[in-house]
Amino acid sequence: MLVLGIESSCDETGLALYDSERGLLAHALHSQIALHAEYGGVVPELASRDHIRRVVPLLRQVVATAGVAPADIDAIAYTQGPGLAGALLVGCAFAEALAFALNKLTLPLHHLEGHLLSPLLSADPPEFPFVALLVSGGHSQLMRITGVGEYETLGETLDDAAGEAFDKSAKLLGLPYPGGAALSTLAELGTSGVFELPRPLLHSGNLNFSFSGLKTAVLNLVRQRDNPDDQFKADVARAFQDAIVDVLVRKSLKALKETGLKRLVVAGGVGANKQLRQRLNSEIQQRGWRVHYPELEFCTDNGAMIALAGTLRLQAGKSVATANGAFSVKPRWPLAELFNAKNST
Ligand code: KG4
Ligand code: ZN
């Protein structure tokens, strides 16, 4: 079975072909970071227009790389939500039109399901069940994953997402959008302990997060300095990263302990963070547990995770929709609605 995956929920156009027997055959991505950088954030209208420009050439690219014909595709999976309405509509309209022309199935998917299952693309995939720490630009949650389509929310952010906190703090430090990776590089030049930032909700007794106060703490530090030099900025970046990594690691360990599971999967863009990986690796190894990450290229948005999620859902007999030409997207789509997830906190 050959599944085409299309991701267009935000500022990356990603297409991929996943074969249920042979695995990932091809994937191609166009990032719009340069397009939005001068505005300091994603401009939705520009994002939609760029998705329109990129989607056909990217399809041609993956089909050529995989050495298949469009008619060989059995189903077309695409991100139906959550995300930017116009950007989602491009992927949805393209997927539905192509499926109509080829007389194939469409699989409208939840973006986070793609992230949650993305570690299964790696050479050493995790077995079910596992705890997933999903930390992206728009989401931060801990989930219990029992199988494909069987997800339970254990805890989530009450305000900003982890990636959002990285990006907002980076902006306060004068770094270009999206600042997560740049802040992390800057933090490597800083010294731990020069500034102490709060660890929000660390002792809340549940698995929820709150990151908006951290960003405010960074703002307060920056405001106190008239002419912040490079070392000051690096020390603030370090303090921010130490705090957020500490909370993410300790809550992940708590989730493992509470569920009795011994496998952690980290997904979403913040999962690329080096310090987070180092801390998790050492804490988890000490306990004899295992931690899995998606390949770095599949941490942030991409088409491969959507093609994979589509294939797995199809194989599991979940949510198979036929192409009916309906262009319907879900810019706001609570995870709980799709998965009937129980919130145990
Ligand atoms: O998963 P993703 O592509 O977006 C959403 O689906 O929301 O993640 C993007 C987020 C951005 O906030 C970006 O700054 C952050 O992931 N990010 C990082 C790193 N690389 C990307 N945050 C911290 N450290 C990194 N190395
Ligand atoms: Zn994402």
Image (tube, grey):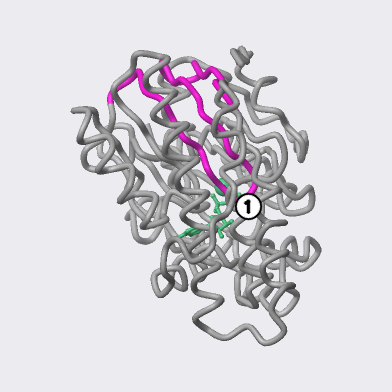
Foreground pick, 329 / 283: 283
Position of residue 138 relative to residue 236, above or below, is above
Q: Quadrant of the N terminus?
A: top left
Residue 13 occupies quadrant:
bottom right
Q: Kindly identify the residue that appears in the image at 33 percent across and 35 percent down.
A: 120
Query: Which amino acid type corresponds to the residue marked 1 in the rendered image?
Result: Ser
132 is within the stretch colored magenta: yes
> Which span is picked out in magenta?
127-155
Q: Kindly identify the residue that appears in the image at 60 percent across and 29 percent down.
A: 208
Residue 180 drawn at (x, y percent):
54, 62
The answer to whether 29 appears left or right of 227 in the picture is left
Residue 104 drawn at (x, y percent):
55, 33
Count every numbered label the image shows and give the total. Answer: 1
Q: Residues within 10 Å of mark 1 (few under 14, many from 20)?
A: many
Residue holding disc 1: 8
Foreground pick, 107 / 100: 107
Position of residue 9 relative to residue 344, above or below, is below
Residue 250 occupies quadrant:
top left
**Label 1 beta carbon less than 8 Å to ligand 2:** no
Q: Kindly identify the residue that appears in the image at 41 percent across and 14 percent down.
A: 259
Residue 262 occupies quadrant:
top left
Q: Quadrant of the C terminus?
A: top right
The answer to whether 318 appears left or right of 261 in the picture is right
Mark 1 secondary-structure assignment: loop
3 is within the stretch colored magenta: no
Foreground pick, 211 / 296: 211
Residue 115 drawn at (x, y percent):
49, 40
Q: Main secondary structure of the magenta part?
A: strand
